[in-house]
Image (cartoon, helix red, strand yellow):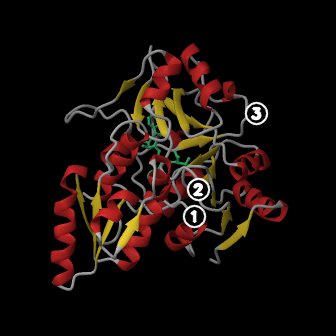
Amino acid sequence: MITYVLPIDNVSLEMAKSEIMRSGVVAFPTETVYGLAANAFDTAAVEKVFAVKGRPNDNPLIVHVHKDYDLSELVTEIPYYAQLLAKAFLPGPLTMVYKSKDTISKAVSCGLDTVAIRIPSHEGAQRFLKYVDVPIAAPSANLSKHVSPVTAKHVFDDLNGKIPLILDGGKCSGGIESTVLDCTGKIPCVLRSGLISREMIAQVAGECDEYVFKDGEKVRSPGMKYKHYSPRCETVLFGYNDREKAFELYRAKSLQGVKAFLMCDDWVAKQSGCPDILNLGKNENEIAANLYDKLREGEAVAELIIAVAPQKQDGVMVGVMNRLKKACG
Ligand code: TXA
Ligand code: MG
C-alpha cells in the first residue's frame, strides 16, 4: 500500500472521508500528538486500528468529535463540573470520560460502560472531524509501545505501507497526549496527566483527584499498565539534583566510544558543556512540545540517551515526568 502524506485541503479531506466511510483508517494531526482515525460506529474499522498499531485489545480508544457535535448522541450524563471544565478548556487537550450511551462500536471502549471524549483544538483536526462528520475513534498514530508521533514524518516512519493517508498539519504544538479525566464520579479524577494539569482542573471544578494504580486492583484506565513511549536505544534517567552524575556518565561512555547524548533543558545543556545534546528547550511548554520529537531524534543518532529530569515537577511537568519515566524504563 502507498502511504500518501498530504497537506489538509479539500482534496485530501475528500480522500480521508472516503477511506473512513469504507472502514479504512487515516492519520490526522491534533494539538497533542497525531491520531490514527476510524469511524467509531464501525467495528471493522476500529479493529483495523488495533491491528495496524499492534495494540492490546483491552486498551480503549478515545472518541474525537468536532466542537459543534451533540454529545448527547454518545453519553448519558454530563455532570455540572464537567460542563464548567468543557467551557474552560475545550476545544483543547482534555479528554473526558463519561457513562456511554452504547451507540458507538463496543470495540472502542473494550467492554467498559464508559466512553472517553475529546474535542481537539488543532484547526486541521477540527476541519477533518467536521468533514467526516462521524465520531472518530483514534489512539496515537504510532506502533504500540513506540514514542508517540508529533509530526507527519514520525507517523510515516512507523506506519508507511500500513495506512493509505497521513494528513499533514505540521508539528503538534502541545507535544504530549491529552489529560484523561474521569467525569463519572462526584468529583473529577485525573487518569492520565497531560497539558491540562490537575491544578488547572481543580481551579475550575473546585476539587480534583488523581488516580494511582495499586497492584491487584482493577485498573481504571487500562492504558496505564502498558509500557509506552520507548525509543529504540538505551535510555537512563537522572533526577535534576543528580545532573552532575549524568554529565559524568556521558563523559565515561563517550570515552568508551559509546555514542551517548544528553537530553535535558536548555539551562542544564549549557551547564553540562557536552557537545551531544538533545535540547528540550527553555520553558515548560517547550519541554512538553519537544519531548517526543527529541526522543525520536535521539533513537536515530544515539546508542544511549542520558536524560536529566526538569527542575520543576508540578503542573504540566507531572505529565512530562510520567512519559520520561516510562520512556526510560
Ligand atoms: O492526545 C491524545 O489523547 C491522543 C490524540 C490522538 O487525541 N490520543 C491518545 O490516545 O493518546 P491513546 O489511545 O494513545 O490513549 C488513550 C488513553 C489510554 O490511556 C486509555 O486507557 C484511556 O485513554 N481511555 C480511553 N477510553 C477510556 C475509558 N472509557 N475509560 C478510561 N480510560 C480510557
Ligand atoms: Mg498512545
Q: Residue at x 65, y 78 (%)?
A: 2
Dot placed on the residue nearer the N-terminal end, 2 or 3: 3
Amino acid type for the residue under numbered disc 1: Thr
**Circle 3 residues within 10 Å: few <14, some 14–19, many ≥20:** few
Label 1 vs label 3: CA separation?
Answer: 27 Å
Tell which residue pokes out farthest to the right in this image: 10
User: In this view of the protein, which residue sits in the foreground, 9 or 202?
Assistant: 202
Mark 1 — residue? 151
Figure quadrant of the C terminus = bottom left
Q: Residue at x 63, y 30 (%)?
A: 74
Dot placed on the residue nearer the N-terminal end, 1 or 3: 3
Amino acid type for the residue under numbered disc 2: Cys
Percent position (x, y) of residue 262? 30, 68
Tell which residue pokes out farthest to the bottom in this image: 257
- Helix, strand or loop status at disc 3: loop
Q: Are marks 1 and 3 in contact (CB under 8 Å)?
A: no
User: In this view of the protein, which residue sits in the foreground, 203 or 224?
Assistant: 203
**Circle 1 residues within 10 Å: few <14, some 14–19, many ≥20:** many
Mark 3 — residue? 68
CB of residue at label 3: within 8 Å of ligand 1?
Answer: no
Note whether residue 111 is visible. Answer: yes
Amino acid type for the residue under numbered disc 3: Asp
| The label number, if any, that marks residue 172 in the structure image | 2
- Helix, strand or loop status at disc 2: loop
